[in-house]
Image: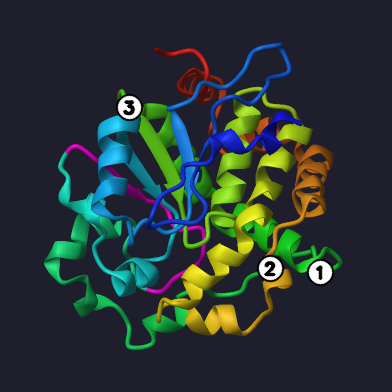
Amino acid sequence: MSATRTDRWLRLDGTANTRDLGGLPTTDGGSTVPGRVLRSDNLQGLSADDVHRLVGEVGLRQVVDLRTTAEILLEGRGPLRALPEVEHRHFTLLPEKGHHTDVFAVEDDDPLQDLPQDWVETLLPRQAADGDAAEPPAVRAYLAYLQHRGEAVVGALGALASAGPGASVVNCAAGKDRTGVVVAFALAVAGVPDEEIVADYALTAEVIDALVARLSASPTYADDMAARDVASHTPRAATMERVLQVLAERHGGPLGWLEAHGFGGEDQRRLRARLRDRS
């Protein structure tokens, strides 16, 4: 599988799990275009050299952040937030307290003042999809994103589809779970076959030790990392295989789910062009 090639990695000082979604084959004999959409873990620790490489060389112009409001506020403003040429969009895939729909629109207006006192408890809440108790934990969690936060999944994909020239990056804390689900849908829209979507998802396993070490060093994520061993954090191909299987059984595949949730033909065409055709 071409998704296992390592030349898609962006080796940065401040992340452990950044890679380009370009170069993946599609079912019609084409391929996704490099430099359009990246996936990554937390971007808060980017070095000055990282910022130069992403913005100056790769042409990064959009960040689609899937973390919760709590995560963003606890981690603080990352270096990309200081750059007016880089747009930031926020679509949390986890339930959270408070009414914020885009923390980036309010973070300079003291958003802490109207968050409940126990808001930190919603940092990484565990959730499961109704009726899927027999599924493995990771599969249940991913299906819960779709069941409980479907509008955020659609919103993130819409942001990618409507982005201007330059590259976008989809990120969360680790760049494997929430990012993995949104990226799976984006690649499906681009015509990437299931086996390549699965391989791209599982590729994070190559950097899982460095990724867990990086998150464990952050006060925001240390407790969550310590609660489970590295093996339990490691993405497995079978997880994404099962998610795609469930989508096929219930909706005819990812595109059917998107149609049912308001991301129809024109939206999909624009996202496909973003990943494949537009210069």
Q: How crowded is mark 2: few (under 14 residues within 10 Å), some or many (20 or more)?
A: some
Residue 131 sits above or below residue 60 on the image: below
Q: Which mark is residue 133?
A: 1
Q: In this view, does 50 lie to the left or right of 229?
A: left
| Residue type, label 1 | Ala
**Position above or below: 194 against 73:** above
**Mark on residue 13?**
none
Q: In which quarter of the image is the C terminus?
A: top left
The chief SS type of the magenta part is: loop
**Range drawn in magenta:** 85-97
Residue 166 part of the magenta segment: no
Label 2 residue SS: loop
Mark 1 or mark 2, earlier in chain: 2
Q: Nearer the viewer, mark 3 or mark 1?
A: 3
Mark 3 or mark 1, earlier in chain: 1
Residue bearing mark 3 = 166
**Residue type at mark 3?**
Gly
Whether 217 is drawn above or below 234: the answer is below
